[in-house]
Amino acid sequence: MANETVLFAKGVCKSFPGVKALRGVNFTLRAGEIHALMGENGAGKSTLIKVLTGVYSKDAGEIFLGDAAKPINVKSPREAQDLGISTVYQEIGLCPNLTVAENMFIGRSKSPFISWRETNARTAKILADLGIPAKPERQLANCSLAVRQMVAIARAMDLNCKVLILDEPTSSLDESEVESLFNLMRDLKARGVGIIFVTHFLDQVYKVCDRITVLRNGELVGEYPLAELPRLALIEKMMGKELQELSEVHAESRDFTGLTPLVEVKDLKSEAGIEPFDFKNYPGEVTGFTGLLGSGRSECVRAIFGADKVTGGEIKVKGQTAKISQPLEAMRLGLAYLPEDRGRDGIVADLSVRENIILALQVMKGFFRPFSKKRASVLADEYIKLLRVKTASQDTLVGSLSGGNQQKVILARWLLTKPDYLILDEPTRGIDVGTKTEIQKLVVRLSSEGMGITFISSEIEEMLRTCSRLIVMRDRKVVGAISGSDLSQDNIMRTIAEG
Amino acid sequence: MAAKDLSPKTRSEPMSDTTSLLIITVAIFLVMYLTAAYLFSDKGFAKPQMFFNLLNENAALIIISCGLSIVMIAGGIDISVGGLTALITVACVVHLNDMEGSSFLTSLLLALGIGLAFGLVQGFLVAYLDIQPFIVTLAGMFFARGQAAMIDTQTRTVANESFSALAQMRIRLPIGSVNNNGVFVQAYMELGVVIALLVVAALFVTLRYTTFGRSLYAVGGNKQSALMLGLNVKRTKFLSHVLCGLLTGLGGFVFLLHVRSGAVTHAAGYEMDAIAASIIGGTMLTGGVGNIFGTFIGVLTKGAIGNIVRAMGLVGSWWPGITLAAMLCFFLILQSVITSRKRAKIG
């Protein structure tokens, strides 16, 4: 049974303006298997899924369903559903204000009237058959997230689905909920459904999956049976090895014993759900948080900076116990944070370069004491030169700059506040190689001037060049720290895999 | 590791939002009315006719509020209903008084036609051109009052025999009370009340037992999800406005039956009264939650507040408004607590 192909995609290509999201990707799903689709951010996982379910139209390639000779051309999620391809998303998909039974059957009935008794009875039968612990009459909002997801799966099953796509279904479930979801998945697998499982939890992949397809930068790395791809190999395939074109930057290891740490945290945890962690950063030291996407790298630094609400633990800044409940307090203590998502957390696209640069300093000074235009323009000019921001003038809107230059503007904003401790979260994502090197050089230079820096990047090479100590994370937990001569790509990957 | 029981720990089945809000509404109305009946029995509160007068006064508002509730359940809003009611009274009076061969039947058709036209246009703009319902119906409100003034700025009384006969119809009930002279007087309802009760019953069934009714809830609850579940979101929104227009047409006719005159100034603030009644009745402004029976009780609650405040001797015209405001605040806080409690439990 496990050999029959239910879905076969061949040479799928998809481009967005400026990005080739998928380059000739092949994908095969067999009946009765759980197939993990893996890849780092930007690898093309979600694009592939959206092409399969008709959210995006593909530029090239063919998709075959079952053993049909004619390729299918799906134009909408609804059409995909009719063909037997169903997707269960984490958030959207069901109506929480309706009952479980209604969510199962709404939009499917041809009759203008509803028989509640029949709807509830049929739902009860389907739920019992799949072993889902939910009552048909209950309002969905009163069910746990796990049950909601299972109801969505039950609906898909009742619609005769052959291909079930689960997109990050486990990220907000607790352990026992994950377990019952897995039981349901195994049950469906035994019934011959092909399941595509997208997740960033490695443990879960090794628990339920049969086969893994790895994508990187929009290209297929390969398809492997689970048994033939140990964790370490999987991580290598997901992360890849970068070209050694930027080797002139390198961090030195220094001895910090005897110094007071700039920032020291103990058992810190936050509302974002990271395991309590310890961490310290000395003046002049560059540390890094590494791990796969979703491992909790950003959540750690967000907790330190007060961007996520801290729920436990202790923070000391320069030896003094500090209470940081919002970013402004962190800023006043000399901390600065360059966020991961430029668009959402950093750039004010409709303001000029100058206004964006002085923003953080202005906030610290107070809004009722504005800078004179002259003072602001002197400050902005200094940093535009220092960081070599390519902009027509100070008055250019930041939104019209390239990604790399936007990043430099945000960097300038934080440098202007003369922080003692600077957190850079993915500062080089999506910018060109030249700018990347400049930013790396700047990090090394700033640290040699005594600034403490924490650097986060998805590219291990970059971390190795800039950091002298790396904190390794997996599944929202710190699993190790590597420093000095132990710093190597192999070591990092081994720690991520085995911890 | 064994999978834990995923059902919540509560002993009884949790109620849906719609049900819990409805129960609160009905309880408050009963407590309020029975207390008033006991305290102000000297002012006639205990007499059945007092209650039926509440219905007689508010029959039109019940029908109109039902239409508005439907739009609100589907996640929209319609503030044109007051203006539209005024337009219908004016148009119908002109039709009944000045045109040959007019009867109550043709005026009913005219009222429904005007309501339908408004519903179709507003529904089209909201659903298919994706314009904010507040803006669309704000324009509708101005247009309707303006149109009414264009037809006639005077207040005119209906002078049409077939219509007047209908308007004077009294439905005598087997209950009643003994008056000051010791004579037993039967309580009565106007025709409009019968129409309103039929509308409430029909809509109750529609919302609960038809695919269309449930689609309204799905669309109001989560548009994106409703789309993914295979519902025609645009058509559902469109139809909610059409239905609201038609019901306002019917409500306008019932209004005319009660006041027997047409004027630009009629039904002033009706849209706000209808929104208030819907909210008191447990309809949520955010959509997806609501109940027609609740709206019916909401209108009666709103009406009873006015009567009780007067009975208490608070003659100032502001008192009913202030009491209503307090009630509304109470209900909005209640709704917010119910939704946030739910979010806290799940999140």
Image: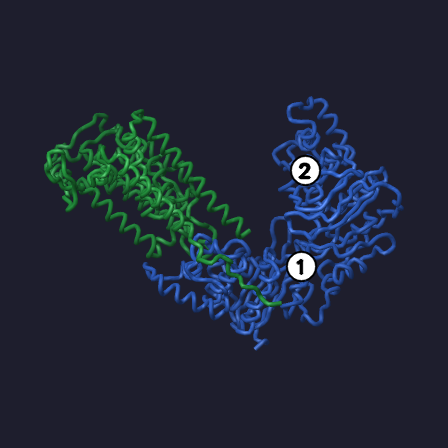
Rendering colour (chain B): green
Residue B67: x %, y % from top left: 31, 44
Answer few, some or many: residues within 10 Å of disc 1's Cα (few below 14, many 20 plus, some between 14 and 19).
many
Indicate the secondary structure of the residue bearing disc 2. Answer: helix
Query: Any idea which chain is the blue one in this picture?
Result: A
Q: How is the image coloured?
A: by chain
Q: Quadrant of the N terminus of chain A?
A: bottom right
- Badge 1 and badge 2 both on one subunit: yes
Say if mark 1 contacts mark 2, CB within 8 Å: no
Amino acid under disc 2: Pro
- In the picture of the structure, the residue carrying the numbered disc 2 is A327
- In the picture of the structure, the residue carrying the numbered disc 1 is A39
Q: Quadrant of the C terminus of chain A?
A: bottom right
Residue A489: x %, y % from top left: 80, 57
Front-most of residues B241 and B196: B196
Amino acid under disc 1: Gly
Q: Residue at x 61, y 34 (%)?
A: A350
Would residue B187 be found to the left or right of residue A303 on screen? left
Would residue A463 be found to the left or right of residue A221 on screen? right
Identify whether B229 is placed above or below A271.
Answer: below
